[in-house]
Image (cartoon, rainbow, N blue to C red):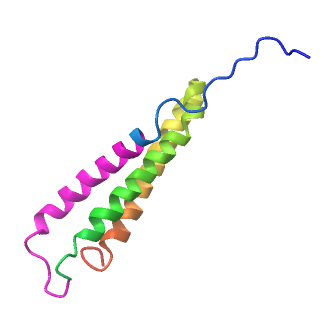
Amino acid sequence: MTHGNLTTQPAHKGSLAKPMAIGAGIAFILITLFLFPVFGLPHPEWSKLWMIRPLIVVPLAGATGGLFYHLLENLRYRGGSKRVLANVLSLVIYVFGLWIGTVLGLAGTLWH
């Protein structure tokens, strides 16, 4: 039983590592720019290495946003309004994740 010429299109074009690395890189640059002005002036009650947590948590949140960008590739591939929806949804998820990551990373130091 032959169904004719069946062709399937790839679900995801490209590697997962690239959008995650880009998302983490953007998040790292943003949190570094945010922390730079207070780098030498920490409060005495903060630990000596207080900036390590935000420098880890925020890029992880950015990488998660890159993961969602990659997962929405199926919608983006279909074109039209679905492409616009996928791009807007990816941006909203990335910004929300970056905000939550920043809050979690800076909790107890700059964010109280």
Q: Which residue is the extreme one toward the left?
A: 40
Q: Which residues are magenta?
A: 19-46
Residue 30 placement (x, y as % from top left): 25, 53
Please identify the quadrant where the C terminus is shown.
Answer: bottom left
Quarter of the image for residue 56 reads bottom left
Residue 47 placement (x, y as % from top left): 20, 82
Quarter of the image for residue 55 reads bottom left
Left or right placement of residue 28 versus residue 74 in this view? left
Task: Identify the residue at horizontal 59%, vertical 33% (top origin).
Answer: 75
Is the stretch drawn in magenta largely helix, strand or loop? helix
Q: How many numbered discs?
A: 0
Task: Identify the residue at horizontal 55%, vertical 39% (top origin).
Answer: 72
Task: Identify the residue at horizontal 11%, vertical 64% (top origin).
Answer: 37
Residue 62 placement (x, y as % from top left): 38, 53
Above or below, 45 against 25 in this view is: below
Q: Is residue 23 magenta?
A: yes
Above or below, 84 against 2 in this view is: below
Left or right placement of residue 82 versus residue 22 in this view? right
Left or right placement of residue 76 versus residue 43 in this view? right
Quarter of the image for residue 3 reads top right
Q: Is residue 90 magenta?
A: no
